[in-house]
Amino acid sequence: MKATMIAPCGMNCTLCYAHLREKNKCEGCRGNDELKMPGCVKCAINRCDARTDSHVDLCYVCAQYPCKRLKELDKRYKAKYSMSMLENLADIKTQGMDAFLQQQSERWTCPNCGSVICVHRGRCSSCGSKE
Ligand code: SF4
Ligand code: SF4
Ligand SMILES: [Zn+2]
């Protein structure tokens, strides 16, 4: 797991189906726009300039954090995928990025084959084993 794959909203793009697929692999929110899903290219959170003053490009540095848009995204992910962007950001803030990445690696590595579990599909991207 890499820090460059953590989006400003707290999404870990390593776990995304668009990153884990074989063809047209998305490099993540901080990667090339041409390879992203259309929704992620025009994402208002990624493009938001409320945090541009900080050297940390994560939403928790923002004075408006957590804004309505971010709370809505978090609510949707919690309901649909049992994952919370706000919890991710809180963990990064309190424990630091390295500890967060370690924790993510433990949570999202398939116990069966060691590949990444896809957050959107809820199963291993390689062997298909359920979380
Ligand atoms: S499609 Fe969006 S959420 Fe998925 S890896 Fe790309 S930028 Fe991240
Ligand atoms: S929390 Fe702040 S930086 Fe993040 S999307 Fe909301 S307003 Fe923009
Ligand atoms: Zn597996």
Image (tube, grey):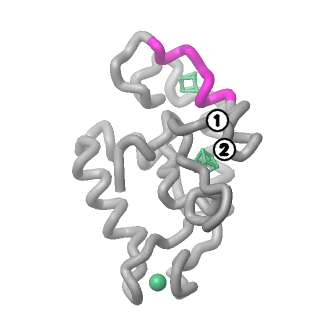
Dividing the image into 4 quarters, which one contains the N terminus? bottom left
- Please say if 34 is above or below 106: above
At 55% from the left and 68% from the top, the residue drawn is: 118
Is 31 on the left or on the right of 106, as rendered? Answer: right
**Where residue 103 sits: x, y (%)?**
30, 60
Indicate the amino acid at tag 2. Answer: Lys
Q: Residues in magenta?
A: 44-52
Res 36 label: 2
Q: Quadrant of ligand 2?
A: top right
At 67% from the left and 56% from the top, the residue drawn is: 24
Taking depth in this image into account, of 104 and 23 the one nearest to the observer is: 23
Which residue, as the protein is rendered here, is positioned at the far top?
53
Which residue does the numbered mark 1 point to in the structure image?
A: 33
Is 113 on the left or on the right of 125, as rendered? Answer: left
At 23% from the left and 52% from the top, the residue drawn is: 99
**Where residue 127 sits: x, y (%)?**
52, 86
Indicate the amino acid at tag 1. Answer: Asp
- Tag 1's secondary structure? helix
Whether disc 2's CB lies below 8 Å from ligand 1 is answered yes
**Where residue 32 sits: x, y (%)?**
58, 37
- Please say if 17 is above or below 87: below
Q: Alpha-carbon neighbours of circle 2 within 10 Å: few (<14), some, or many (≥20)?
A: many
